[in-house]
Image (spheres, grey):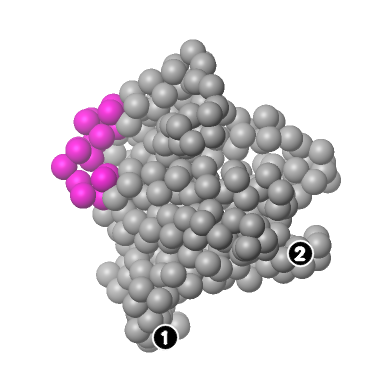
Amino acid sequence: MTWFIFALISIFAIAIANVYQKLAMRETESDPLAAGIFFQLVLTLITGVFAFFYGFHAPPFSQFPFYFLNSAVFYAAGTFLIFKAIKEIEASELVILTAFSAIITIAGGIIFLGEPFSLRQVLGTALILIAIIIVQKKTGLSGKWGMWLALLGGSCYAVAVVSDTHILKTYDAVSYTPVMSLLPGIILLLFNPRVVTKLKSYVNATYVKNLSLYCFFYGIQAVCYYVALNKGANASQMAPLFRAEIILTVILAVIFLREREKIPLKIFGAIIAAVGVILLK
């Protein structure tokens, strides 16, 4: 199969994963911290197997101790906040709000990496902000705590990505992915080790089944993304193509999660947000 097929599989997989995340976290017994730990550890297993066959290289902790710690802490915080946010708001709302993370990434690149800020990026920033304002004003999101959790969680991920940039200049991304999946999981586990007991009592519950499927499809998207790159795709092709995730998630949420309030507005916001992210890339 060509890189384009793997890219499409990756896009569909992450959109499906977003649906299962909402299905899992809308269960009353779901716990954001336990779910975050479970997600990070399962993702470590999936991406670790892929990295092993691809050619895993030991992480250069001694070269980048600060950046490894920084990325791990912010990924851990982002994971917890996103899982907490999805309990409060719709999947279609979350995927639009987290587009804000692209702005934080660009800002971090300008401040810490000395990257330029072009007119195209100004337009992309404006479109993302417009999409967020439209959706949060017209859907009643502005009064929901989940909106701020989503924005903060996405921002944590963005800060981690800026930190990743320093490490990935000399360390391959395939080996890095399982490492940076495991470290946030360990941090979350250390935060409250007893929380894992909450998962044990729900082994046969729909909650854990949906959470497992979320982890599985998220892992599939990560693997297919790297296979696409390995088969000839480059970042400039993958970045805009992958933004279809925003629109596809909104559509799947309408169909399978029955998130049918203000559908035209959500689709319009998703398209604007996707175009904005593409311009930022």
Which residue shows up at 45% across the image and 82% down it?
Answer: 204
Which residue shows up at 42% across the image and 86% down it?
Answer: 200
- 254 displayed left or right of 45: left
Residue 59 percent location from the top left of the image: 67, 63
Quarter of the image with the N terminus is top right
Report which residue position mark 2 lands on. Answer: 56
Quarter residue 197 falls in: bottom left
Give the residues drawn in magenta, as a range. Answer: 133-148
Kindly give the residue lying farthest to the top in the view shown: 119
Instruction: Give me the C-alpha separation between circle 2 and circle 1.
Output: 32 Å
**Amino acid of disc 1:** Lys
Which of the labelled discs sits on residue 169, or is there none?
none
Report which residue position mark 1 lands on. Answer: 200
**Does residue 155 appear in the picture of this structure?**
yes
Which residue shows up at 21% across the image and 49% down it?
Answer: 145
Residue 134 percent location from the top left of the image: 28, 27
* Observer-nearest of 229 and 159: 159
**Amino acid of disc 2:** Phe
Kindly give the residue lying farthest to the left in the view shown: 143
**Does residue 89 appear in the picture of this structure?**
no
* Observer-nearest of 6 and 33: 33
Q: Secondary structure at mark 1?
A: helix
Image height of 223 relative to 276, above or below: below
Residue 230 percent location from the top left of the image: 80, 46
* Observer-nearest of 180 and 99: 180
Badge 2 density bin: few <14, some 14–19, many ≥20, Cα 10 Å: some
Q: Is residue 145 magenta?
A: yes
Residue 99 percent location from the top left of the image: 43, 37
Q: Could you tell me what secondary structure mostly forms the magenta stretch?
A: helix
Marks 2 and 1 in Cβ contact (< 8 Å)? no
Q: Secondary structure at mark 2?
A: loop
